[in-house]
Amino acid sequence: MSPHRLRLATRWLVFNGVGVIGAAVQLAVIAALVNGAGLHYAPATVIAVEAAILHNFAWHRQWTWRDRPAAGERRAGWQALARFHLSNGLVSIVGNLIVMAVLTGSLGIAPLFANLVAIVACSLLNFGLGDRWVFPEVRSL
């Protein structure tokens, strides 16, 4: 395996480690809102996804892409957060709502299981967007 592919594979594993913890945050929030507070699954999904997005951005910045410029610079960090919301956030919210509507709304599958399926479905696209657009590698000439 080439050094580049090894770095990419390692970064993908770290991304998924952060994602697993983010998924736990998301599932805990949706469980508290749907089961505890009696909120409808659709707004609960949006709130839970946003909690996971903020969690994941903070840890991706500190762990997954700490070697990239946006990880250490204050202004670049805010710009990366905006890009993270536009990419990973949009993919996660829209993807989760679509999957939840189909699995829970149409098929009657439990919201927690449906949410877990949605998280997995969105993860590969989110990694690519994070690696290429949110925390892009700066190439020297």
Image (spheres, grey):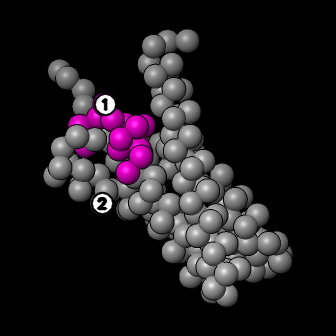
Q: Which quadrant of the structure image shows residue 27?
A: bottom right
Does 1 appear above or below 96? above
Q: Is residue 87 visible?
A: no
- Checking the image for residue 82, the label placed there is 2
* Residue 59 drawn in magenta: yes
Q: Earlier in the sequence, mark 2 or mark 1?
A: 1
Q: Is residue 53 left or right of residue 96?
A: left
- Quadrant (top left, top right, bottom left, bottom right) of the N terminus: top right
Measure the alpha-carbon separation of dots 2 and 1.
19 Å
Q: Is residue 141 left or right of residue 97?
A: left
| Range drawn in magenta | 58-70
44 vs 122, nearest the viewer: 44
Q: Which quadrant of the structure image shows residue 16?
A: top right
Residue at the (35%, 44%) spot, across then down: 61
Give how far across and how far down residue 64 sits, in percent.
42, 37
Q: Which quadrant of the structure image shows residue 40?
A: bottom right
- Residue with the mark numbered 1: 67
Tag 1, which secondary structure? loop
Give how far across and how far down residue 26 sits, in percent.
58, 63
Give how far across and how far down residue 139 sits, in percent.
24, 26
